[in-house]
Image (cartoon, rainbow, N blue to C red):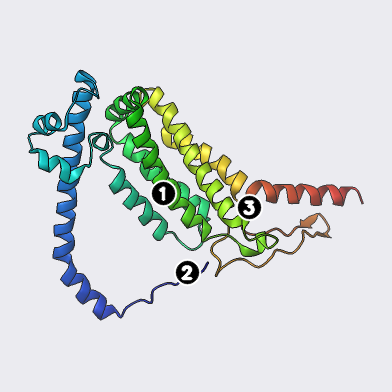
Amino acid sequence: MQYVRGMPQPAKSSRIAASTDAPERAAGGRAAAQRLKMRRELAAAAMELFSTKGYEATTVDEIAAAAGVARRTFFRHFRSKEEAIFPDHDDTLVRVEAVLNAAPAHEHPLDTVCRGIKQVMRMYAAQPEISVARYRLTREVPTLREAEIASVARYERLFTRYLLGHFDERAHADDANDDPLLAEVAASAVVTAHNHVLRRWLRADGRGDVETQLDHAFAIVRRTFGTGIGAGREMSPSPAPPAATTSHGEVLVTVARTDAPLDEVMRTIEAALQERRSR
């Protein structure tokens, strides 16, 4: 699978376009902010009613009334009352995709995906009390739990597509059919690591350095699934020569892939040292 990068436009045209589009972008930004504000107000009203009356006993009309809007306004933002408990996932998915699209060429694709899913964690961390209350509620109501699972699946599909476009074909030349499997497993690992840390944080009532915990979990995923995923099919690195050593006095020279994980580089160095000492 190949990527085609858009050609940059002349500077003058870019300035004109930027000048023309600025009011539209500003208006679009205000509309998006108002939309998100209303969604959050409806979600807050739903959460309050679900907590006091119970999920099954709460109606859409009651949620709309509690938020001070008409029933039709509710349905402009959510298709059902269970959707109202997850107001930010649509916007967060857009931000995650933007992270993937703007990834620098030198960044390892798994690192890009990990940066992307941090947007999801920050969404939860922005409102710890609501996130904790929502977590408790979803544990009690199977319908909400299913809605949450469906939301998570959207991120996983996005990451799978992204990683599938970044496999090094030469690393899987024996069976290229493994690419979709490996991409899906790696994407699932990132999402699973995120969800593990998120659940632990929610069970602790939203306390603790969740970003540090997340980085630790991602380091494990990177060590496990980092091999065989390159910077893109068009820019796949050339096959690395086998590890070699030469000695000049007390100097030892080794050769390793530039995209190899640190633990792999260290093993190469250790093997070279052992071979040198056994001579």
Left or right: where 161 falls relative to 252: left
Q: Whole-Å distance between the Cαs marked 2 and 3? A: 21 Å
Q: How many marks?
A: 3
Residue 167 appears left or right of 207:
right
Q: Nearer the viewer, mark 2 or mark 3?
A: 2
Give the residue type at disc 1: Gly
Residue matched to label 3: 227
Q: Earlier in the sequence, mark 2 or mark 3?
A: 2
Q: CA distance from mark 1 to mark 2?
A: 20 Å
Binning the other alpha carbons within 10 Å of mark 3 as few (below 14), some (14 to 19) or many (20 upward) gives some
Image coordinates for residue 50, horizontal then vertical, percent: 22, 24
Residue 39 visible to the viewer: yes
Residue at image mark 2: 3
Residue at the spot of label 1: 116
Distance from Cα at disc 3 to Cα at disc 1: 20 Å
Query: Residue 135 vs residue 168: left or right?
Result: left
